[in-house]
Amino acid sequence: VKAVWPPVDPAKLVLRLLTDADFLAAHAEGILTEDEQKTILWAGPVRSVKSARWSAADAVLVDEAADLVERTHSLGHVVLDEAQDLSPMQYRAVGRRCSTGSATVLGDLAQGTTPWATRTWEEALAHLGKSEGVIEELTAGFRVPTDVIAYASRLLPHIAPGLTPVASVRENPGFFEIRTTEGDTAGDADVVAACEELLRNEGSTGLIAADARVPALAEALTAAGLTYLSPGEETTAQTRLTLVPASLAKGLEYDYVVLDEPQAVVDGEPDERTGLRRLYVSLTRAVSGLIVTHKTALPAQLV
């Protein structure tokens, strides 16, 4: 049987499709255009599956091929968190794990920070294979202060049209202020001063900035004698300030936050929509208070 019908190795199959133009053309005819085929072909030869430089996107292609060779076992129930960042192919991979079971999908469309982030839950459920799923929109927030979430919600029409703004259940509006900084070096000094001000309070403080701004701010903090941590490091009584690249801000929270140069956060992403979503994430990391500092103009969507 193996001689007549050789077993198919999913990884080898995908690798050949991605590296052999003639093989891809033969099987993609009528499905992918010539330009689309050229786009997905890898540049240069690859010796073997082990030497190939696979990406996370390639992994779900191999997973799909593996399901065609041998059907994926279905679980009884799958819980999927932070679902807004999944691609259609990733949804399909999860859907195969609950093809005969059920699923609970959790996520915030406004916090999708990948170029392929989910646009609607109806679209996500279709890729998951659960088009009949019930969608429940949660609109009561308890973590972010009222004034902060109201300001961040100005971005919603541009990043998640139709999404109901979150209403904070906290009576305390929280501390919120927007400050314009001045000069080339004075701007960084003003950011440092904002950090020093917030550190007079109890609790943790996060300085969130566009990734490209982090080295300059690190230098300014050091020059001012302020010690700081990197994301993931535990705060101590001596060091309660964390310098956070915007790309790593998702899922983190601090008692107080200084957000540096919102426009730079937007410009740090491959497209404006993703940049504005990254900015929304950065704006909603504060539990008690937020100071936004900027020298360049704020994004028009916030004005």
Image (cartoon, rainbow, N blue to C red):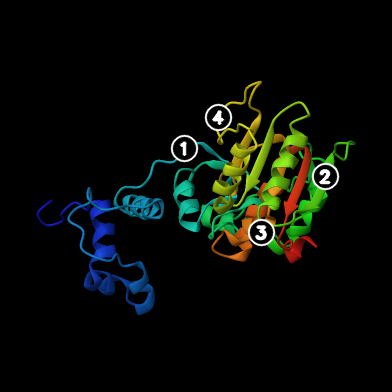
Q: Position of residue 249 (x, y in %)?
A: 61, 43
Q: Nearer the viewer, residue 65 or 116?
A: 116
Q: Quadrant of residue 266?
A: bottom right
Residue 179: tell me if it is visible.
yes
User: Callout 1: helix, strand or loop?
Assistant: loop
Q: Amino acid at mark 3?
A: Leu
Mark nearer the viewer, 1 or 2: 2
Q: Earlier in the sequence, mark 3 or mark 4?
A: 4
Residue farthest to the left?
A: 3
Q: Nearer the viewer, residue 211 or 166?
A: 211
Q: Amino acid at mark 2?
A: Phe
Q: Name the residue tied to disc 4.
A: 233
Give the residue displayed 66% in from the left and 41% down from the top: 207
Q: Position of residue 241 (x, y in %)?
A: 65, 33
Q: Is residue 202 above or below residue 292?
A: above
Q: CA distance from mark 2 to mark 3?
A: 20 Å
Q: CA distance from mark 4 to mark 2?
A: 26 Å
Q: CA distance from mark 1 to mark 2?
A: 46 Å
Q: Earlier in the sequence, mark 2 or mark 3?
A: 2
Q: CA distance from mark 3 to mark 4?
A: 27 Å
Q: Amino acid at mark 4?
A: Glu
Q: CA distance from mark 4 to mark 1?
A: 36 Å
Q: Which mark is residue 75?
A: 1
Q: Name the residue tied to disc 2.
A: 176
Asked if disc 2 and disc 3 are in contact, CB closer than 8 Å, the reply is no
Give the residue displayed 29% in from the left and 58% down from the top: 14
